[in-house]
Image (cartoon, helix red, strand yellow):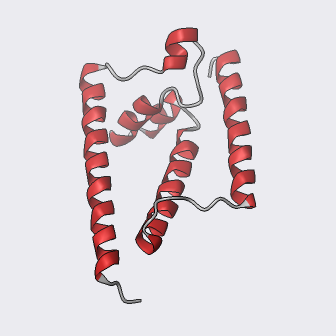
Amino acid sequence: MNIDGLHKKRIRKLFLSYTIAIVVLLCYALFLKYTGHGIGCPLYELTHIKCPCCGISHFSVELLSFRLKEALSNNYMAPAIYGLIIWLLVEGSVRYIKDGIFVVKVTLIKRVFVLIFAIIMVVWMILRNVMGI
């Protein structure tokens, strides 16, 4: 497949955008690691109920230090959450390179998958708060 100038320009834009995002996230992770202060979860701050994503920042810091056991102890569902985010970013990026729009085409299978994922996240939120996970 031949990549023309327009596709190369879109690839460069995506590369720059992702590079900036990764640098910002790494800076935040380093700040969190060395200060212990990060962006708090609004749900937890207001209700002291952990949302499905609580602990993702600490998960990331531990993962960057190659401490998988400690990373997972912060949020067991973080790999699934990251997997969903990466899937959506990859699909959106491919569509952007191809068509010039960064959207994910919604199909019935994707709707069912996201619904199941959302149900699992709600169950996870209940379990982690009731059982203290």
Quadrant (top left/top right/bottom left/bottom right) for the N terminus: bottom left
- In the displayed structure image, the side of residue 97 where residue 19 appears, left or right: left
Residue 108 located left or right of residue 53:
right
Q: Is residue 1 above or below residue 6?
A: below
Q: Is residue 75 left or right of residue 12?
A: right
Residue 42 image offset from top left, x and y in percent: 49, 18
Of residue 119 and residue 72, the one placed in the foreground of this image is: 119
Q: Residue at x 28, y 71 (%)?
A: 9
Q: Which quadrant holds the C terminus?
A: top right
Task: In this rendered view, identify the residue nearer to me: 59 or 3.
Answer: 3
Residue at horizontal 28 percent and vertical 80 percent from the top: 5
Q: How many marks?
A: 0
- Residue 53: which quarter of the image? top right
x and y, in percent, of residue 89 in the image:
47, 56
Tell me if residue 17 comes above or below residue 93 in the rendering: above
Q: Position of residue 33 (x, y in %)?
A: 29, 27
Q: Relative to 20, is 2 on the left or the right?
A: right
Residue closest to the eye, 115 or 61: 115
Residue 97 on image: x %, y %: 41, 70
Image quadrant in which you'd find residue 121: top right
Furthest residue in direction bottom, as rendered: 2
Q: Residue at x 41, y 29 (%)?
A: 58
In the image, is residue 131 above or below residue 106? above
